[in-house]
Image (tube, rainbow, N blue to C red):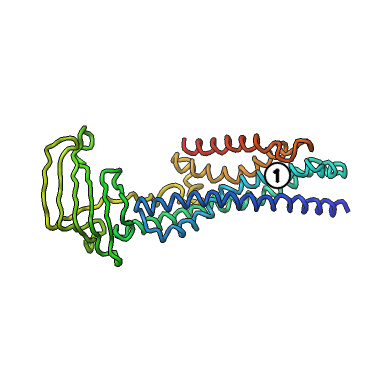
């Protein structure tokens, strides 16, 4: 009979916590996915790093990684909200008077936390590396496409750390010909000097050179070379000119975040970056347990205060804890 009552109470608590967990995680996912979408769309539309058609593929690959980050926070807030409501409505007082002690509450909550921690461990330790590798390979493949397949007319693009600036007014429907081109190049030999040499090229039209994705052929234009602020410029008119496009920054597909968890364990602490990545992956499931132990005393509120009385200090504590995790990983 006692076991049956305990199971009923456990199911009730689990329902309250999980319903809050799903709602909170869903809202957090929407917020973070929207932020990431704007970031990747900006890279595609304004940075010319890749075609906008792959943005949704990249976002889909972000879901497992974001879930691994957000589930600890979601469960922490779910416990605060669910148990805070029980305290505010005096349901927890009724459970205590029926023999459901704080020790049993802790045990039942830790069972739920352990289940969430296992899911987070799977996502952060095993799923995230494969997703990160697939995402970087997708971006690398997209960046290897011809430049005129990714750029949008009417916008300025910066390459090579700002040492190459280019602009096109229009592009043909088949993405073969571009018109009214502006290109500004900084001389790499004088980067450390004041008054760097710049060359500015304008042309009426151009096209991608077949066989070389980083070579444009521009036609019927002028080229100006000199130092900004100096009146001595060299002016050249050309019929045809080859322009070499700077390589775009490509993600390192061999970085620690794509190394499988088993490989990281075998490597151990020999390399600081690998050690930091290993500790980061382990810290995420552990944070579920630690935050649960922290949430239980914080959720105790006076009925007159309301169920959200401890919400603000609990969030501030999490912000400090999460920031220390990120700082520790960076160090």
Q: Is residue 231 left or right of residue 178?
A: left
Please, is residue 102 above or below residue 63 in the view?
above
Q: In this view, does 220 lie to the left or right of 159?
A: left
* Residue at the spot 29% in from the left edge and 64% down from the top edge: 175
> Would you identify the image quadrant in which residue 284 lies?
top right
Q: How many numbered dots are placed on residues in this image?
A: 1
* Residue at the spot 19% in from the left edge and 51% down from the top edge: 202
> Would you identify the image quadrant in which residue 294 lies?
top right
Q: Is residue 331 left or right of residue 96?
A: left
Q: Nearer the viewer, residue 209 or 6?
A: 209
- Measured from the top left, where is residue 196 in percent x and y? 20, 37
Residue farthest to the top? 194
Q: Is residue 21 left or right of residue 204?
A: right
Q: Which of 309 and 232 is in front in this view?
A: 232
- Measured from the top left, where is residue 16 in percent x and y? 73, 51
Q: Mark 1 points at which residue?
A: 81
Q: Assess disc 1: are there few (<14), some (14-19) or many (≥20) residues with their C-alpha within 10 Å of its C-alpha.
A: many
- Measured from the top left, where is residue 161 in percent x and y? 30, 43
Q: In which quarter of the image is the N terminus?
A: bottom right
- Measured from the top left, where is residue 69 in percent x and y? 56, 47
Q: Which of 242 and 296 is in front in this view?
A: 242
* Residue at the spot 65% in from the left edge and 47% down from the top edge: 75
> Would you identify the image quadrant in which residue 233 lies?
top left
Asked which secondary structure carries label 1, the reply is helix
């Amino acid at each position: 009979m006692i076991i049956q009552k305990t199971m009923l109470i456990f199911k009730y608590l689990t329902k309250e916590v999980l319903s809050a967990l799903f709602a909170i995680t869903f809202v957090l996912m929407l917020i973070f996915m929207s932020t990431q979408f704007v970031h990747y769309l900006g890279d595609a539309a304004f940075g010319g790093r890749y075609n906008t058609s792959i943005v949704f593929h990249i976002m889909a690959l972000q879901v497992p990684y974001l879930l691994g980050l957000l589930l600890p926070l979601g469960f922490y807030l779910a416990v605060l909200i669910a148990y805070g409501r029980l305290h505010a409505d005096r349901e927890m007082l009724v459970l205590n008077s029926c023999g459901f002690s704080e020790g049993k509450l802790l045990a039942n909550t830790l069972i739920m936390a352990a289940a969430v921690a296992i899911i987070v461990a799977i996502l952060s330790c095993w799923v995230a590396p494969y997703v990160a590798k697939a995402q970087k390979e997708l971006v690398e493949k997209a960046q290897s496409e011809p430049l005129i397949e990714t750029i949008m007319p009417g916008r300025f693009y910066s390459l090579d750390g700002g040492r190459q600036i280019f602009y096109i007014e229009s592009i043909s429907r088949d993405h073969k010909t571009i018109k009214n081109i502006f290109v500004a190049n900084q001389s790499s030999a004088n980067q450390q000097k004041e008054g760097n040499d710049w060359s500015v090229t304008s042309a009426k039209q151009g096209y991608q050179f077949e066989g070389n994705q980083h070579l444009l052929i521009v036609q019927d234009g002028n080229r100006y070379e000199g130092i900004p602020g100096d009146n001595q410029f060299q002016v050249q008119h050309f019929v045809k000119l080859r322009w070499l496009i700077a390589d775009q920054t490509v993600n390192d597909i061999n970085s620690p975040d794509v190394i499988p968890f088993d490989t990281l364990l075998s490597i151990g602490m020999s390399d600081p970056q690998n050690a930091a990545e290993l500790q980061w992956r382990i810290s995420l499931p552990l944070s579920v347990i630690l935050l649960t132990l922290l949430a239980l005393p914080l959720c105790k509120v006076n009925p007159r205060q309301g169920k959200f009385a401890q919400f603000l200090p609990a969030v501030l504590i999490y912000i400090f804890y999460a920031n220390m995790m990120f700082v520790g990983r960076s160090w």
